[in-house]
Image (tube, grey):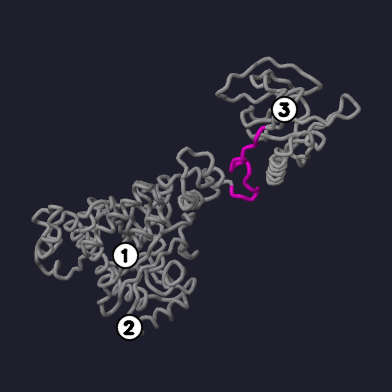
Amino acid sequence: MALAKASRDFPPGVIKSESEWVRADAGMTNRAILVTRSTSPSPTRSHLSVGIAPVSLNYEIFNHFPSSERPLIMSVQHRISSWLASISAPGVAEAPCPIEARPRKRVRQEARSNVDGLTRVASPFNDARESGALIHLSTPSVSASSPPNFPQQHRLAMSSSPSKRRRDEDLEDSYSVASSSSYYPSSSRHPGPSRSSPTKQIRHAGLQRTGFRQASFEFDPQPPSLQSLCQSLRLIHYGDGILPTRLKTEFADIKLPGFFFHDDPNTAARRYPDRSFVRSLLSQANECDLDGKGESSWNMDVHARILAWLLEDDSTDDACLGSEYCTTAGLLREYKPNGAPSKMIDFCLAIRPRRSEDQDIIDDIRSQRPGDSINHTDWGSLSKYPIAISIETKRHGEQYDAALLQIATWHSAQWRSLRWGRQEEVDRLLTVEFLSGLIVQGHDWQFVPSILGKDAVSKVVRPPLQIGDTRTETGILKLFPSLQELKQDAEKRFWPAFKVDVLINGTPC
């Protein structure tokens, strides 16, 4: 028996022993390995314990080590055995095998000779070949030590990208997008999501009757109700009379222009956050941005607080909005576009009827609809409360096309839900004229509505309208009036139109 040694500094697949360098199987990783080599009475037969067989300890040599070092040796042997048991590697090649040609930082030595049928390589490490010191082993990398059933996408996300996420939540976010089904059918030339970017999926969705198309705020016709709402949102974003004059003193230190302040019925009807709340939101959003926090941190620390403040006012008599955090909500099969991505949206603002008779009608109708749901998803309470505003969030500066794809696909399914069971589906107009959507990228909040074309295909209207941000106090002061406009539109326009289209004219199939 002879004790063989290897170091993390050795070339991958090469093991240094007392008498030669052994070319191991190409599947071995660049890690230190403790090996025992036994030679049979026949000079032509030998066995190398590495990679597959459990690593055995040579107690004859082990007893020569000082007692103070024996616990370390036992620990190393145990770690190697555990590591080898967790991976599935092929057997060691016993025939000569050339070292694979790939770039290395260290200089390759070309001189080679053959001893006992095994490859011997001249190496700068040969000088240390006769050293009797035990070399410490490094912990195997994630890619090498992951259990066999660990998803391959996760291994790639953790080990291959130089810009990999530092947080588990970011890994989850990236994996959920990467694993989404593509708009391309399985029989097409584009077999999977890895080959179809969100931009390509958006383009392809425009060719599908169950997909969606794109329209322009400037050049495409829009219903009057959408034009009126967008005009109000633009004026708020310009800062035109968004604050009452009584707040001049409270916000004097940020030097707002004079036209920000005006007293009229609009400013009198709005609510305004306390300065302390504005500063708190600003601080939390800045922390999420500078610390590179993931989407879920932005959702909980910033976006959810804004929505909670917005929905504190429930003075409407007929119905009020409620917020649902629904990142796992999926589309019902009956409404889902062909090949649509599986990850949809993050928040929904849904109508909660105040009158019990309205809720009774909803419950009766949804019992006859797909999934026993009044909406295009059967997720939780969204099965009984009509969705008025859908919100998709991303980290700051990240994946706008993916967000647009998700909100547009979601709206496309929602239009089919609104038209479910109707006769003369294409020709008969709906009372609901547009669907409200928001894309939130870190600080920035953008309004992205969808309208229904004459051919009953959804159209997402672009470019998105900026309605405020959490980057500055001024941006926050614009955001809250804009959200109140959207809330009022949902309660005063969408809800009455929904009742006509679904609760009155909807015909169960």
Query: Which residue has dot 1 on it?
Result: 307
Q: Between label 1 and label 3, give the one nearer the viewer.
A: 3
**Quadrant assignment, res 63:** top right
Q: Is residue 320 left or right of residue 6?
A: left
Looking at the picture, how far across and down is residue 445, in whole percent? 29, 55
**Image point (53%, 44%), residue name:** 158
Q: Nearer the viewer, residue 162 or 397?
A: 162
**Would residue 275 be seen by someone viewing this image from the given angle?**
yes
Q: Is residue 257 left or right of residue 95?
A: left
Q: Is residue 81 magenta?
A: no
Residue type at mark 2: give it. Arg
Looking at the picture, how far across and down is residue 413, in whole percent? 42, 62
Q: Earlier in the sequence, mark 3 or mark 2?
A: 3
**Image point (26%, 65%), residue name:** 486
Q: Is residue 43 above or below residue 357?
A: above
Q: CA distance from mark 1 to mark 2?
A: 24 Å
Secondary structure at numbered mark 2: loop
**Image point (86%, 28%), residue name:** 45
Query: Which residue has dot 3 on it?
Result: 132
**Image point (34%, 49%), residue name:** 289
Secondary structure at numbered mark 3: loop
Residue type at mark 1: give it. Leu
Q: Which mark is residue 355?
A: 2
**Quadrant assignment, res 79:** top right
Q: Earlier in the sequence, mark 1 or mark 2?
A: 1
Secondary structure at numbered mark 1: helix
Residue type at mark 3: give it. Gly
**Bounds of the magenta span?**
135-151
